[in-house]
Amino acid sequence: MPAIACSAALMLAGCGGGSSSVSTGAGASAAGGNGPFLADADAICSQAQKTGSALTPARNESELAAFLDRELILGRNEVNKLSALHPPSDKAAAYRIWLESLNQTLGELGATVVAAKDQKTEEVNALVREAGGFDERSLTRAKEVGLTTCAKAG
């Protein structure tokens, strides 16, 4: 069972693994170039990785749905914060594609939550395996944008 929970946790690795409480104030604008944008995005991912790693993993099947649901909430929160940033024009297309891949990963995690609540273990396992591909693509896309912290599995 822990392998399922650990693998499910990897679904959010491409987006940091959780939520954050980082402010995206004035530095979130592209007006100052790549520096503030990259710093803000990486700060969100760093905090999300820290928050996500603090979640207590499910110890058994009865705890799995609640654990995955917490991950989903944290992941949506993080993606919402990342979506509020305004990348410089030279990174805008790659950033949009990355955010789309994160949303696709969150969709898969949502489906996994539903399957776990319905105690469909085989479906959970299949969704977790499928999520590995989404995770790899998300990490690659974060690298393309130049987001070093967001590009780390975490």
Image (spheres, helix red, strand yellow):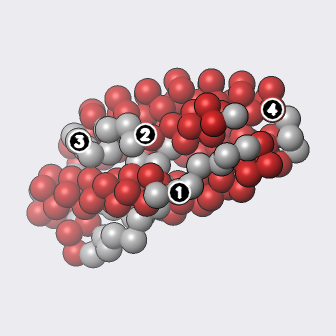
Q: What element carries label 3?
A: loop
Q: What residue type is labelled 1?
A: Leu
User: Label 3: which residue?
Assistant: 148
Q: Which amino acid does label 3 sit on?
A: Thr
Q: Which residue is drawn at 53% across and 57% down?
A: 55
Residue ID for mark 4: 121
Q: Residue 82 carries which label?
A: none
At mark 2, the secondary structure is helix
Quadrant holding the C terminus: top left
Q: Look at the numbered discs 4 and 3 and tell me whether their residues touch, using CB distance below 8 Å.
A: no
Q: 133 above or below 148?
A: above
Task: Look at the numbered discs 2 and 3 and tell me whether their residues touch, using CB distance below 8 Å.
Answer: no
The answer to whether residue 153 is left or right of residue 135 is left
Q: Give the structural element (helix, strand or loop) at label 1.
A: loop
Quadrant of the snapshot with the N terminus: top right
Q: Which residue is drawn at 65% across and 48% down?
A: 58
| Residue that appears at 35% across and 60% down | 47
Question: Mark 3: few, some, or many residues within 10 Å (few <14, many ≥20)?
Answer: some
Q: Earlier in the sequence, mark 4 or mark 3?
A: 4
Eyeballing the image, is 4 above or below 72? Answer: above
Q: Badge 1: few (under 14), some or many (20 or more) residues near its Cα, within 10 Å?
A: some
What residue is pinned by disc 1? 55
Mark number displayed over residue 14: 2
Query: Real-space Cα distance between discs 4 and 2?
Result: 24 Å
Q: Earlier in the sequence, mark 1 or mark 4?
A: 1
**Disc 2 or 3, which lies upstream in sequence?**
2
Q: Which residue is drawn at 80% across and 49% down?
A: 62
Give the residue type at disc 4.
Thr
